[in-house]
Amino acid sequence: MFYRYHSASCQQRGKAYEARIEALKRDARERLRIGTPKEDVVRFFKDNGLPVSLQGDEYEGTIYTEGCAPAGCGSDAALLGLRVKADSSGAVAGEPIVGALYTNCL
């Protein structure tokens, strides 16, 4: 069994990371409803500190950050991303998907 010591600052980063994930999920559900226009989608990404690009029929943005990784991870490096389907006019066409994970784990 693996054990990894988590300092107080690590625990604070971990809590902040988890809180940001939950807030992004909640806010995306509320503000990125089907039919939301392109301008509002771009604003939402920027308001949340996420770069935005339109790849095919999907908006996407990912940032790299730090949290407090569990045992089995080599560092506290993490990512947080958002994807949203778009229609031909650039309006939201599907439910937003928030992804988050630690990047340096077994």
Image (cartoon, rainbow, N blue to C red):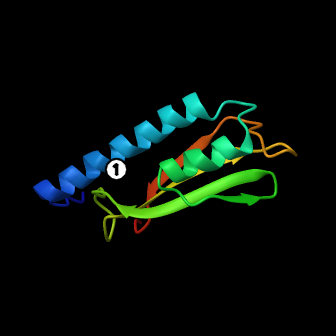
Which image quadrant for residue 64? bottom left
- Report the residue marked by disc 1: 17
Kindly indicate the quadrant of the structure image that contains residue 32: top right
The image position of residue 24, as x and y in percent, is 47, 41
Q: Is residue 42 left or right of residue 88?
A: left
Apparent side of residue 5 relative to residue 31 in the rendered image (left or right): left
For the question of whether residue 19 can be seen, the reply is: yes
Q: In this image, 11 relative to 79: left or right?
A: left
**Pick the front one: 38 or 30:** 38
Which of the two residues, 52 or 4, is positioned nearer the viewer here?
52
Quadrant in which the N terminus is drawn: bottom left
Question: Is residue 26 positioned above or below 44 on the image?
Answer: above
At which x and y percent is residue 97? Answer: 61, 42
In terms of secondary structure, where does tag 1 sit? helix
Q: Mark 1 is on which residue type?
A: Tyr
53 w.r.t. 33: above or below: below
Residue 54 drawn above or below residue 19: below
Q: What is the tally of numbered marks visible in this picture?
A: 1
- Residue 6 in sight from this viewpoint: no
Q: Which residue sits at x=71%, y=34%?
A: 36
Identify the residue at image location x=38%, y=63%: 65
Q: Determine the image quadrant of residue 9.
A: bottom left
- In the displayed orientation, state which residue is furthest to the right: 88
Give the camera-side residue of 82 and 105. 82
Around disc 1, counting alpha carbons within 10 Å, would you say few (fewer than 14), some (14 to 19), or many (20 or more)? Answer: many
Residue 17 percent location from the top left of the image:
34, 50
Give the x, y percent position of residue 58.
74, 51
